Image: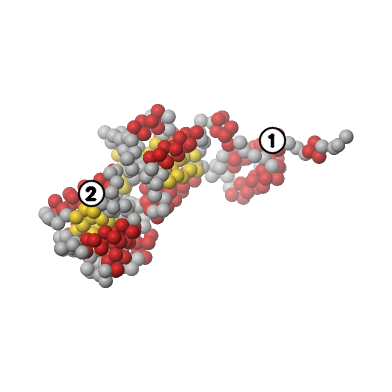
């Protein structure tokens, strides 16, 4: 009779946490913490347990563990333009805050498609994530937030928001940021200031446009050019060339984001014009590239990393207290003055601060 070689080997499915603990020389509870990716275990102990898991061939059934627990220590994160460096910084902030609490995130790029967004949310529901951080896609039905509530799925809206308060939200004051940029340009003597970019009818774009129009009215400026377009370098490049061919051309532009501003600077150079001299340029977001450009870009810092951290913390608070009062955490932007607006940096007027101003309130 043939000998079954596997009969003398232990069935991997029968390996227990106690077996792993004995092999690694630690307690069973320590093994459990490592499997749940708890930050409470020292790294050298974590490595020792992982080596024992590998040696014994143990496979952790996370799905079964989730069924035994009310939480999975996971969050879904939906953004709409992962190629934008703003979102890279924001997601890094999210992951940093989650990692400190033993959470991990699943990231999806909706590309501003409601259908892609819907599929991701449904899949995350199937995987029983503990909550969602959602940058709503353009034209998102406000009823989606009610649907997530019906699913008992905590949802924190980030940067954009749909529906009516109260809802949980983390973002920055885009309206104030544009007003800061406009005030600075007016103080430099500009009277023909255009606004470039933003075609989607969502909250973050509307807040910027309102800030632009309100500033024109407050300063008594009659020149108004608000050009809608996608928020890319290409459209910034094209729009500035179109504007500079008009009579009269603008003397300054405020851009929806830094990508549009980078494109505008390139467009001015293509025309043989000098950014900051022939036309001032101000961006929004203050991504890392802004300070490294030629010329360095004046930009409204919107603190993407801090927004990510605040959004993640708010999600964890909501998971711990599902029925608590809804919160909005809004960070105050800060203008970073560099060469592209034609003014030298004024540190006294716009000091660097390691932590952005934070306003937290519960909407009525």
Q: Nearer the viewer, mark 1 or mark 2?
A: 2
Q: Secondary structure at mark 1?
A: helix
Residue, x 69% and y 35% (percent of image)? 13
What is the x, y in percent for residue 310? 38, 45
> Seen from this angle, which residue lies furthest bottom?
272
Quarter of the image for residue 322 reads top left
Residue, x 59% and y 49% (percent of image)? 43
Mark 1–mark 2 distance (CA, rounded to whole Å): 60 Å
Q: Is residue 320 left or right of residue 242?
A: right
Q: Nearer the viewer, residue 47 or 237?
A: 237
Q: Secondary structure at mark 2?
A: helix
Residue, x 82% and y 37% (percent of image)? 4
Which mark is on residue 34?
none
Other residues around mark 2 within 10 Å, as few (<14) / some (14–19) / many (≥20): many
Instruction: Answer with mark 1 or mark 2, whichever residue precedes in sequence.
Output: 1
> Seen from this angle, which residue lies furthest top?
150
Circle 2 is placed at which residue position?
A: 209
Other residues around mark 1 within 10 Å, as few (<14) / some (14–19) / many (≥20): few
Q: In this picture, is 148 found above or below 224?
A: above
Q: Is residue 16 left or right of residue 364?
A: right
Q: In this picture, is 80 found above or below 297?
A: above
Q: In what quadrant of the picture does the C terminus appear? A: top left
> Seen from this angle, which residue lies furthest right?
1
Q: Inspect this view and state whether residue 334 appears.
A: no
Q: In what quadrant of the picture does the N terminus appear? A: top right
Which mark is on residue 13?
1
- The colour scheme used here is secondary structure
């Amino acid at each position: 009779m043939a000998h079954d070689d596997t009969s003398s080997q232990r069935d991997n499915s029968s390996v227990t946490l106690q077996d792993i603990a004995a092999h690694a020389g630690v307690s069973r509870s320590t093994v459990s913490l490592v499997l749940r990716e708890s930050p409470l275990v020292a790294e050298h102990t974590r490595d020792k347990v992982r080596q024992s898991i590998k040696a014994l061939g143990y496979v952790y059934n996370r799905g079964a563990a989730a069924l035994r627990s009310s939480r999975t220590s996971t969050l879904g994160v939906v953004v709409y333009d992962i190629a934008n460096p703003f979102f890279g910084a924001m997601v890094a902030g999210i992951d940093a805050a989650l990692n400190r609490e033993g959470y991990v995130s699943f990231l999806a790029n909706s590309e501003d498609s409601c259908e892609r967004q819907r599929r991701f949310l449904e899949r995350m529901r199937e995987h029983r994530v503990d909550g969602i951080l959602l940058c709503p896609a353009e034209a998102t039905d406000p009823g989606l937030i009610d649907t997530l509530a019906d699913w008992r799925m905590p949802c924190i809206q980030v940067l954009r928001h749909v529906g009516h308060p109260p809802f949980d939200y983390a973002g920055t004051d885009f309206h104030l940021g544009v007003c800061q940029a406009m005030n600075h340009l007016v103080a430099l003597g500009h009277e023909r200031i255009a606004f470039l970019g933003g075609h989607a009818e969502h909250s973050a774009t509307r807040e910027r446009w309102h800030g632009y129009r309100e500033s024109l009215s407050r300063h008594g400026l009659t020149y108004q050019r608000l050009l809608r377009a996608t928020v890319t370098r290409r459209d910034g490049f094209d729009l500035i060339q179109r504007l500079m061919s008009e009579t009269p051309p603008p003397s300054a532009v405020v851009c929806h984001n830094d990508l549009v501003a980078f494109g505008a600077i390139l467009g001015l150079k293509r025309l043989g014009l000098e950014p900051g001299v022939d036309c001032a340029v101000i961006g929004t977001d203050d991504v890392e590239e802004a300070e490294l450009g030629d010329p360095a870009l004046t930009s409204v810092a919107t603190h993407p990393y801090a927004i990510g951290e605040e959004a993640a913390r708010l999600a964890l608070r909501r998971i711990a207290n599902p029925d608590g009062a809804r919160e909005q955490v809004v960070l105050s932007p800060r203008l970073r003055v560099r060469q592209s607006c034609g003014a030298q940096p004024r540190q006294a007027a716009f000091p660097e601060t390691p932590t952005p101003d934070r306003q937290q309130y519960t909407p009525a």
